[in-house]
Image (cartoon, rainbow, N blue to C red):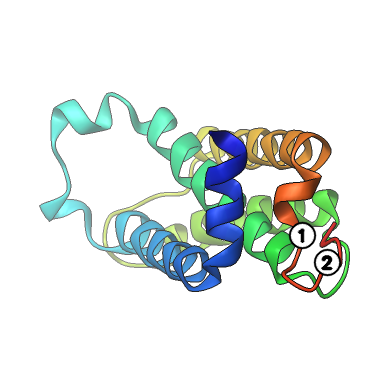
Amino acid sequence: MIGKSIAFLAGKKYIVYSLFAAITLATLMLTLLPPDNLQNEKLFQYDKLGHFLMFFGWSFMFGFSLIINGKKKSPLVLIFIAGTLFGLSIEFLQELLPYGRTASLGDAAADAAGSFFAVLLLWWMKSHYKNHLSLSNGKNTI
């Protein structure tokens, strides 16, 4: 079942690229827009979990899109660094923007943890589902 899902997504790259773009846009909107419209007390009880899940999703889709692109090997360390730098950049921008948002070391740590676990999942997929990640011409993408 997992292998079939991976093979399906690897064959429909536009879905993966669209999901990556949507997650990027949602992450930017949720983290950089003024918090007035987003400030629901119940939602912000899970702030760190939200950061973890957003950056897990972003890093996973970024890495998966690199893997299925198949032009060259996708270095997992660089995927982790990209996710972490994306999170740090957002925290820096929050401090600069006049919306009343502030940077948080805890948020940055949750972002990095989400990226790390996404890389672990990508590593597991690459090692267990190699055959499902191959291009239609038979070349292995990883």
Residue indicated by mark 2: 138
Image coords of residue 52 (percent x, y):
50, 35
Q: Between 111 and 67, which is closer to the camera in this rendering?
A: 67
Q: Label 2 amino acid?
A: Gly
Asked whether, in this view, residue 123 is left or right of residue 68, the answer is right
Measuring 13% from the left and 53% from the top, which residue is drawn there?
36
Q: Is residue 10 visible?
A: yes
- Exactly how many numbered labels are in the figure? 2
Q: Secondary structure at mark 1?
A: loop
Q: Is residue 80 visible?
A: no
Measuring 72% from the left and 70% from the top, which residue is drawn there?
136
Measuring 21% from the left and 53% from the top, which residue is drawn there?
35
Q: Nearer the viewer, mark 2 or mark 1?
A: 2
Asked whether, in this view, residue 64 is left or right of residue 30, the answer is right
**Label pair 2/1, CB-CB below 8 angstroms:** yes
Within 10 Å of disc 2 (Cα), the crowding (few <14, some 14-19, many 20+) is: few
Asked whether, in this view, residue 41 is left or right of residue 80, the answer is left
- Residue 134 badge: 1
